[in-house]
């Protein structure tokens, strides 16, 4: 073997090692973050943490019951608004999206997916907070819904597209009109995929903070009234992490652990719904 | 078929068919309307930003982009430090994230043992699932102390003579912001470039290997050049993310209206300014200035994203590449 060939092999081996090392380095922060969340957050989680609202500033004790409930209400409401629009748009893209309009909507969805979430927050502020005159959970939910729609539209489209053509043809041949074919056969077959996409989108917005800063605002008390300001886990973490008290920092880590756990459960559940059926790449 | 039999047998069928078929245009109309909601939303969003930014635009003109004075008391606003900070922190993030993300993409598509590919890809995707505010929390209490104790002293010792690493390191800084952003955008760049590399025809790779190339040479000289537009697109998608990222950056960058070359100094970004000041903007002009900041941020990210999409589509036409991560 010539020196040249040896050198080429050595370079190949070296670069293989380098990309493997880079890959390891990229995953490392995740392991550190998860580790730190458990190490610093787990000890603060007890029964009171889930059942009580925050104690007055500087005092110890108290929990994040208000924030957990608020996250549930705001994200749930966002899903109610965002899911139908997103899934409908996704069906349009898959079923009627071959033309120019489809291309345009697809492009707009992709561009919207990259819109900074804080800008969407401004949008919801001008549309709801400003005319109504006060901050509200509803405004926060609208902001999150706007973030969800393009995500869900694109994943739903992809899932509906994966349904084999033979299925559609069989239904049409049996005399089903197009709309029933689409709804009862095609969309139904793609349902688990659509559910997965929706869960992923919900998990994403559940951790959003920026669009809620001047819409849902935050609230120290427990409330489920969507016309009032409402706390979420993400807002609570922001306030506590940037605040001056050690007690707050402790609660911020615990709240972050809960939020991360919530997001992880949603993401894993989404994977479980589809399992190996779709997208086995 | 004679007309007589058609008339005698068929009448019920066309009637019921016609009745059922009324559902078709209705269904199509409904999903089309829902789809049109997206461009409509985008249009309203832009219009709203532009209308509300008008007063500030009129008052300050192009000077808004170049002035560094941001004084709510005197009602003078210039966004240069934030624009500078947004660009610098994002570029810093790219410098760190691109090698990492490409390492992930290349390793997972070309070299990793098959059984490790899915789990590792999943772990990288999980980085995208970590909420921004959790990154911020981790940045404040773990990353910044780490930088202060272990990373900045050697950096200063080695590179302290350059303008990039001068000044005292207090913690909240461009450097901290850039690193947090880098960790956050790695999964996006990695996921999209991985799919781009997977979309490169196997014949490219096989031809290179057949000519006697080593595996690395095949990747470097046959696979990556073919996927280049898509990979550039992936990097730009990451850039778009970094430009608009708000919470984590706000929590670690220091939020100071300064333009400085040193990455050890605190800075500001457009998103951070909106996050910090929007709800306390007391005057109309103040609010309008923040709307203009939002508009600038929006225009920059949309331009970067649109360009990125076009580049990615060139490699894999129309495919929803990266939709799992994005």
Image: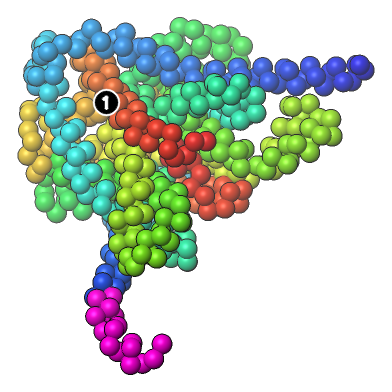
Horizontal and vertical percent position of residue A60? 12, 10
Horizontal and vertical percent position of residue A252? 24, 18
Query: Which residue is found at the position 29% from the left and 80% from the top?
Result: B14
Horizontal relation, residue B193 to residue B8: left or right: right
Snapshot quadrant of residue B159: top right
Q: Nearer the viewer, residue B117 or A138?
A: B117
Q: Is residue A266 above or below residue A168?
A: above
Query: Which residue is found at the position 81% from the left and 30% from the top?
Result: B213
Query: Where does the magenta region start and end?
Result: B1-18
Horizontal relation, residue B22 to residue B148: left or right: left
Determine the secondary structure under disc 1.
Answer: helix
Residue on which disc 1 sits: A262
Q: In this view, does A256 lie above or below B6?
A: above
Snapshot quadrant of residue B253: top left
Main secondary structure found in the magenta portion: helix
Snapshot quadrant of residue B271: top left
Residue at the outermost right position: A2
Label 1 packing within 10 angstroms: few (<14), some (14-19), many (20+):
some
On the question of residue B307 being in view, the answer is: no
Horizontal relation, residue B178 to residue B287: left or right: right
Q: Quadrant of the C terminus of chain B?
A: top left
Q: Nearer the viewer, residue A1 or A272?
A: A272
Horizontal relation, residue A182 to residue B156: left or right: left
Q: Is residue B113 above or below residue B153?
A: below
Chain of the residue displaying label 1: A
Query: Which residue is found at the position 37% from the left and 16% from the top?
Result: A34
Horizontal and vertical percent position of residue A177? 32, 67
The answer to whether residue A83 is magenta is: no
On the question of residue A7 being in view, the answer is: yes
Q: Nearer the viewer, residue B305 or B148?
A: B305
């Amino acid at each position: 073997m010539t020196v040249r060939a040896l050198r080429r092999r050595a370079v190949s081996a070296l670069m293989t090692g380098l990309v493997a090392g880079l890959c390891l380095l990229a995953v490392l922060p995740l392991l550190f973050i998860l580790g730190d969340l458990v190490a610093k957050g787990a000890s603060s989680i007890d029964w009171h943490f889930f059942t009580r609202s925050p104690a007055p500033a500087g005092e110890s004790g108290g929990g994040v019951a208000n924030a957990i409930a608020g996250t549930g209400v705001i994200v749930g409401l966002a899903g109610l608004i965002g899911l139908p629009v997103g899934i409908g748009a996704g069906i349009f893209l898959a079923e009627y999206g071959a033309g120019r309009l489809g291309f345009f909507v697809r492009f707009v969805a992709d561009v919207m997916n990259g819109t900074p979430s804080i800008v969407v927050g401004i949008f919801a502020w001008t549309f709801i907070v400003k005319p109504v005159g006060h901050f509200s959970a509803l405004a926060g939910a609208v902001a999150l819904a706007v973030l969800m729609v393009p995500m869900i539209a694109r994943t739903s489209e992809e899932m509906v597209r994966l349904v084999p053509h033979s299925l559609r043809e069989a239904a049409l041949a049996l005399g089903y009109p197009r709309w029933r074919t689409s709804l009862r056969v095609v969309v139904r077959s793609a349902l688990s995929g659509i559910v997965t996409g929706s869960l992923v989108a919900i998990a994403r917005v559940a951790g959003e903070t920026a669009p809620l800063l001047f819409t849902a605002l935050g609230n120290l008390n427990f409330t489920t009234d969507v016309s009032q300001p409402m706390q979420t886990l993400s807002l609570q973490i922001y306030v506590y992490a940037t605040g001056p008290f050690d007690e707050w920092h402790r609660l911020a880590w615990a709240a972050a652990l809960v939020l991360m756990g919530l997001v992880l459960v949603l993401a894993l559940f989404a994977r479980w719904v589809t399992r190996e059926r779709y997208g086995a790449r | 078929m004679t007309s007589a039999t058609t008339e005698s047998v068929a009448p019920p069928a066309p009637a019921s068919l016609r009745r059922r078929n009324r559902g078709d245009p209705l269904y199509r109309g409904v999903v089309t309307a829902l789809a049109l909601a997206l461009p409509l939303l985008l249009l309203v969003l832009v219009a709203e930003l532009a209308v509300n930014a008008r007063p500030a635009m009129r008052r300050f003109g192009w000077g808004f982009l170049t002035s560094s004075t941001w004084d709510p008391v005197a009602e003078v606003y210039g966004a240069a430090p934030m624009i500078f900070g947004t660009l610098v922190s994002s570029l810093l993030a790219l410098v760190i994230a691109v090698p990492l993300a490409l390492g992930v993409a290349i390793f997972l598509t070309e070299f990793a043992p098959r059984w490790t590919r899915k789990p590792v890809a999943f772990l990288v995707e999980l980085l995208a699932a970590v909420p921004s505010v959790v990154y911020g929390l981790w940045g404040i209490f773990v990353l910044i102390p780490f930088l202060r104790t272990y990373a900045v002293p050697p950096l200063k010792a080695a590179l302290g003579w350059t303008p990039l690493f001068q000044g005292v390191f207090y913690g909240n800084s461009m450097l901290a912001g850039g690193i947090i952003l880098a960790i956050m955008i790695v999964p996006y760049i990695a996921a999209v470039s991985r799919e781009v590399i997977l979309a490169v025809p196997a014949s490219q790779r096989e031809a290179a290997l057949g000519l006697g190339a080593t595996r690395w040479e095949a990747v470097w000289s046959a696979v990556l050049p073919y996927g280049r537009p898509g990979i550039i697109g992936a990097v730009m998608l990451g850039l778009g993310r970094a430009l608009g990222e708000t919470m984590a950056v706000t929590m670690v960058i220091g939020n100071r209206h300064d333009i400085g070359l040193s990455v050890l100094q605190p800075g500001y970004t457009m998103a951070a300014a909106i996050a910090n000041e929007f709800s306390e903007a007391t005057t109309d002009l103040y609010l309008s200035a923040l709307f203009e900041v939002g508009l600038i941020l929006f225009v920059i990210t949309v331009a970067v994203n649109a360009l990125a999409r076009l580049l990615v589509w060139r490699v894999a036409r129309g495919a929803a590449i990266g939709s799992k991560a994005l």
